């Protein structure tokens, strides 16, 4: 089996740019450390500690799931099937959705010195998709996802 793994791009602009390395060890170590701090701040045996541990586990599971999706996407891109309709496009959309879901949690720690600026919302799959949506929605406001930071 061929290896289609891509290296992460220097600047993430679109969800099509994502590679397995973007949700790899660096992000998972960062999240594990931040959630470890939150878990340790909760008294043992409390609901608050359980909820914090659960959020940590779900978030890290989401990272592994997205990494699996990106492995599939890298093979699709590597074999020239990225523009085929059907399940390839569902996967493409899901990657953006899952990335933004993880980023919503990750950005809660954006003041930490180890936070990377590349961990940001990616509202579009690629430049063509961005142009299309902006053309279609010219009479509507497309909200910047940064507005959703809590």
Image: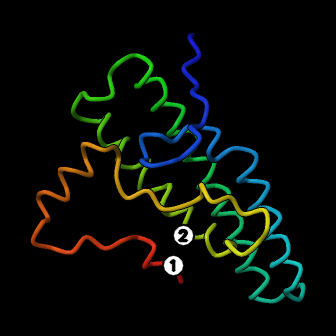
Up the image or down, 77 lies above or below 79; here it is below
Q: Could you say which is closer to the camera, residue 148 or residue 141?
A: 141
User: In the image, is 120 to the left or to the right of 145?
Assistant: right
Residue 54 x/y as whole percent: 69, 71
* SS for dot 2: helix
Residue at x-position 12% and y-position 66%: 138
The answer to whether the residues at label 2 and label 1 have Cβ atoms under 8 Å apart is yes
Q: Earlier in the sequence, mark 2 or mark 1?
A: 2
Q: Name the residue tied to disc 2.
A: 104
Residue furthest out toward the top: 1
User: In the image, is 52 to the left or to the right of 5?
Assistant: right
Q: Which mark is on residue 74? A: none
Quadrant assignment, res 44: bottom right
Quadrant assignment, res 62: bottom right
- Image quarter where the N terminus lies is top right
Up the image or down, 9 lies above or below 102; here it is above
């Amino acid at each position: 089996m061929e290896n289609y793994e891509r290296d992460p791009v220097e600047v993430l602009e679109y969800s099509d740019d994502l590679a397995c390395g973007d949700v790899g060890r660096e992000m998972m170590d960062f999240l594990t450390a931040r959630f470890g701090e939150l878990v340790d701040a909760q008294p043992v045996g409390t609901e608050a500690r359980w909820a914090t541990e659960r959020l940590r586990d779900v978030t890290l599971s989401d990272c592994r799931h997205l990494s699996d999706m990106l492995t599939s996407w890298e093979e699709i891109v590597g074999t020239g099937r990225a523009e085929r309709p059907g399940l390839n496009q569902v996967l493409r959309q899901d990657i953006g959705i899952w990335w933004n879901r993880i980023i919503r949690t990750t950005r809660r720690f954006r003041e930490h010195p180890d936070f990377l600026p590349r961990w940001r919302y990616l509202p579009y799959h690629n430049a063509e998709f961005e142009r299309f949506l902006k053309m279609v929605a010219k009479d509507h406001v497309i909200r910047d996802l940064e507005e959703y930071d809590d």
